[in-house]
Image (cartoon, helix red, strand yellow):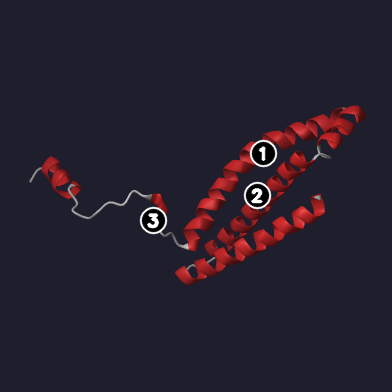
Amino acid sequence: MTLRENVRSTSKDPRPVNLDIGTINLPVTAYASITHRVTGVLMFFASFLMLWALDMSLASEASFNHVASILGSPFPRFVAWGIASVLTYHALAGVKHLIMDAGVGETMQGGVIGARIVFALAALGAGAWGALIW
């Protein structure tokens, strides 16, 4: 059997293929991993906004007052809360990964417990940021 015939015979898998993402049940560890990646991307884009605000606030007293007045309205406060919450989740999930890299909680049960702890602490952190910002 040639390589081409072998590839053809193995690619015709009779198993059903479910492409409806809404019906796939993922474990909590998968949601934690996906959320960690998404928050990393969000932090990358948020860093440009934060650097702009830092640059503006350090330019002069007038520009500092301008940034402070912008952050006084509700939508920019919501954005600041979102950035702080994303940073909190990403940091907590990163610490969880470092702990797992050290050999603690590498089992499926340990991963589930760690993911639930990260979600709970991130929710508490988001609430704390909300109380601080508003």
In this view, 49 is above or below 20: above
The residue mark sitting in front, 3 or 2, is 3
Disc ID at residue 23:
3
Give me the residue at 58% from left, 59% from top: 98
Element marked by disc 1: helix
Nearest to N terminus: mark 3 or mark 2: 3
**Where's residue 1, x and y in %?**
7, 46
In the image: residue 125, left or right of residue 24: right
**Where's residue 33, x and y in %?**
51, 55
The residue mark sitting in front, 1 or 3, is 3
Give me the residue at 76% from left, 58% from top: 128
In this view, 76 is above or below 66: below
Element marked by disc 2: helix
What is the count of numbered marks? 3
Write down the residue under mark 1. 46
Badge 3: how crowded within 10 Å, few (<14), some, or many (20+)?
few
Q: Quadrant of residue 77?
A: top right
Q: CA distance from mark 3 to mark 2?
A: 27 Å
**Where's residue 130, x and y in %?**
76, 53
In the image: residue 31, left or right of residue 39: left
Q: CA distance from mark 1 to mark 2?
A: 10 Å
- Asked whether the beta carbons under mark 3 and mark 2 sit within 8 Å of each other, the answer is no
Give the camera-side residue of 24 and 56.
24
- Asked whether the beta carbons under mark 1 and mark 2 sit within 8 Å of each other, the answer is yes
Write down the residue under mark 2. 86
Give me the residue at 59% from left, 47% from top: 39
Nearest to N terminus: mark 1 or mark 2: 1
Give me the residue at 87% from left, 28% from top: 63
**Where's residue 85, x and y in %?**
68, 51
Name the kind of residue labelled 3 in the image. Answer: Thr
